[in-house]
Image (tube, rainbow, N blue to C red):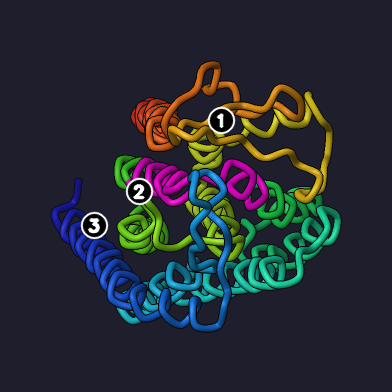
Amino acid sequence: MDPNLILIYQKLLLSSGICGLVAFLVTFLSMPRLIKKLKAAEIVGKDIHKPSKPLVAEMGGVGILFGFIIGIFLGIYFYPNLQFQLIITLLVILLVGMVGMVDDLVMLSSKEKLILLWLAGLPLIWIAPPNVGIIYMLSMPVAVSIAANLTNMLAGLNGIESGLGAIAMTSLSIACIIMGKYDVAVISMCMLGALLAFLYYNRHPSNVFPGDVGTLIIGATIVVVAFIGRVKIIAFIVLIPNIIDMMLKLYSAGVMERQKHQPTQVGDDGKLMAPETGFNSLIRWILKRPMQEKNVVTIVWLIGIFFGAVGIIMAYILKSSMF
């Protein structure tokens, strides 16, 4: 490989790492203040998976969004030639985040959320490859809507969304580096940095919940990286835990509004139990016997790590096939 090209790639990788680090620091330092403000505004929710049902700050995903935005702005400064695609990325994630905020505040129906997320994904059409058909272009916002809902569905336990999202972003970042797609690594690294910082406050026992504003932007970011970086197969692989969860829910209960869901039960000893009736899910599939919440989350993370590793192996395979 040309030494000058290697130097360019090294600079891109270093700059992406700096953007991810800045996103981490911004989210990490802003979360304590944000948590206080959310509690003062009574934007809180019950942690129903604890015997005492403590009130926890909601909509903490705003902190993830804030860190990601600052990281991407820095990326725009580092990569003037990538300014257009990074601005489109920023626009899509901001719009998806706004849908999440509205959903957190007024609880949208499933149909309303799908439509709004589709509209939020429309700017991706501007960065579609040349000479693609209308079906491909329309599939881009559809993918945003589907993936955002997937990462929103596998949720509810302390640290499960942010941890699984961080695992997916780690896999995507490594895969993009392996395949030489350093230009999109900044996107995945910014989200990875923000998620890792948020996980510190969201891990068991949680001081803050991400809300839909946090969970929706994870899936949207995966889709943005998939289309811009042309790593759609790897993005699909890292989403398999979420896809399994969705299939179990659809097969057992069809499309249900959240308020109709029967929550997972918690015993006096703090162990979670799947209710005798109601929909099935990945979490309830794991709960064949009562289990501590943090153990359930760890198992889901391990499933995510497995498919993340498969995604990285696939990146090696795809890279080899290019030569």
Answer whether residue 184 is visible to the viewer in this image. no
Residue at x 68%, y 34% (from the top left corner): 246
Q: Which residues are magenta?
A: 148-173
Q: Which of the two discs, 3 and 2, sits closer to the camera?
A: 2
Q: Is residue 100 above or below residue 140?
A: below
Q: Quadrant of residue 155?
A: top right
Residue where numbered disc 2 is placed? 173
Residue at x 78%, y 55% (from the top left corner): 138
Secondary structure of the residue carrying numbered label 1: helix
Q: Which mark is residue 9?
A: 3
Q: Quadrant of the N terminus?
A: top left
Q: Is residue 85 left or right of residue 258?
A: left
Image location (x, y in percent) of residue 69: 44, 75
Q: Earlier in the sequence, mark 1 or mark 2?
A: 2
Q: Is residue 131 left or right of residue 194?
A: right
Q: Quadrant of residue 128?
A: bottom right
Residue where numbered disc 1 is placed? 283
Q: Which mark is residue 115?
A: none
Secondary structure of the residue carrying numbered label 2: helix
Image location (x, y in percent) of residue 254: 83, 33
Tag 2: amino acid: Ser
Q: Which of the two discs, 1 and 2, sits closer to the camera?
A: 1
Q: Is residue 164 magenta?
A: yes
Q: Is residue 238 magenta?
A: no
Label 2 Cα neighbours within 10 Å, binned few <14 / some 14-19 / many ≥20: many
Tag 3: amino acid: Tyr
Tag 1: amino acid: Ile
Residue at x 72%, y 65% (from the top left corner): 122
Residue at x 52%, y 50% (from the top left corner): 222
Image location (x, y in percent) of residue 205: 37, 51
